[in-house]
Amino acid sequence: MEVGSVRQRVYSDKELDQAEGAAIEALKAGSQQPIPDPDQWLEEELKRNILLTTVDAMINWARRNSLWPVVCFPACCAFEFITTAASRFDISRFGMEIIRASPRQADLMITAGTLTWKMAPNVRRIYDQMPEPKWVIAMGACGISGGIFASASYAVVPGYNRIVPVDVYVPGCPPRPEALLYGIRQLQKKIAKESLAKRKA
Amino acid sequence: MTIALPGKEIADKLAGKFPGTIIDSNPGWFTVKSESLIPVATFLKEAPEYDFKYLTYVTAVDYFDHFEVVYQLTSLECNHSVVLKTTCPRDNPVLPSVVGLWRTADYQEREIYDLMGIRFEGHPNMRRIVLWEGFPGHPLRKDFNGT
């Protein structure tokens, strides 16, 4: 049986052309007006990609996610900090992978280790050289209170808060990298609440 | 291994050459009067049978009524060593410096001065080495109370 003869029996070529023409006419009849912009409900500002927020939220977001620590490693806590910065714990997940050797390019001081009075003026000088805004995490027992040297030593500073203002205290001897990362997260939460109107002392 | 020479034998030999200088001697060490420290040390360094050209360390001990300064001398040629001690009173802690014989003593005598308060006469640079100038007292003394 021929294919042509079967089709001939159902629709002729002319009938198919007429059906196609009717569909086009129907679509054309229903498309006389342009379809409106589905985002028409948005305001003009948003159409130009403007996001409304506060200056504080914007700046705090930028600051807390790009904390650059300065090198201040007077003693053994430095090894836990180095581990934190290395691939297993990976401090760069929080935007902090660039550990600066120059205090002028840093905004976070992680005080990893025992501080002696003889070293204290140098640490204070590093802190003074850091540009505002700047934050300090006191890492480890020695950084918080002098640690095992707190009670009897003539040479050890009993806590970094005698020298520089401390934002977050991370206990441990030394703290595990997880603890230091938790301390950094706490500092980020703290920065998120800061305001440009109230400057740090 | 370096042989530790018996202090008593050396002290007995020295007693003839330096009469009246040996305060105490036993197999481990011997103690000389501070006035004769330099002659005895010079002899021990120069004499070929001892040849103590190397000073391993200098350190000091506080015995409440007096200070004791300990020198460990070593001969790298003969591979032997001995411990020499001397004493000084607490109220006037002054000893002759051995920097002229062994340059090793330079920093170590400064450290003893810093932490124990014994002054070494003849030292070229008798200043504190660890603590800062103006620190009150000498912290390794038994009667130091730093808190």
Image: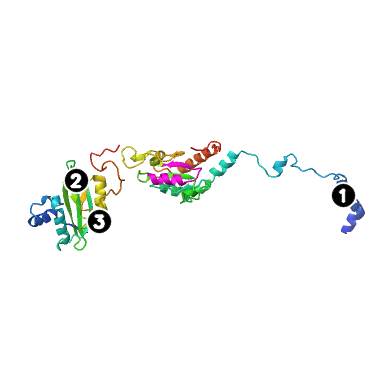
Numbered mark located on residue B93 in the image: 2
- Pinpoint the chain carrying mark 1: A
Q: Quadrant of the N terminus of chain A?
A: bottom right
Does the magenta segment cover residue B95? no
Q: Amino acid at mark 3?
A: Thr
Disc 3 designates what residue?
A: B104
Front-most of residues B66 and A91: B66
Q: Position of residue A27 (x, y in %)?
A: 86, 47
Which quadrant would residue B46 be assigned to in this image? bottom left
Residues at circles 1 and 3 in contact by the CB criterion of under 8 Å:
no
The residue lying at 17 percent from left, 50 percent from top is B85
Front-most of residues A61 and A180: A61
Q: Tell me how far mark 2 sits from mark 3, CA to CA.
A: 21 Å
Check the image and report above or below for A148 versus A104. Answer: above
Q: Amino acid at mark 1?
A: Ile
**Upstream in sequence: badge 2 or badge 3:** 2
Q: What range of the chain is rendered magenta?
A: A120-139
Does the magenta segment cover residue A127? yes
Q: Secondary structure at mark 3?
A: loop
Numbered mark located on residue A24 in the image: 1
**What is the crowding at mark 3: few (fewer than 14 residues within 10 Å), some, or many (at least 20)?**
some
Q: Secondary structure at mark 2?
A: loop
Q: Tell me how far mark 1 sits from mark 3, CA to CA.
A: 105 Å
The residue lying at 52 percent from left, 41 percent from top is A188
**What is the crowding at mark 1: few (fewer than 14 residues within 10 Å), some, or many (at least 20)?**
few
Comparing labels 1 and 3, the label whose residue is closer to the camera:
3
Q: Position of residue B75 (x, y in %)?
A: 20, 60
The residue lying at 88 percent from left, 51 percent from top is A20
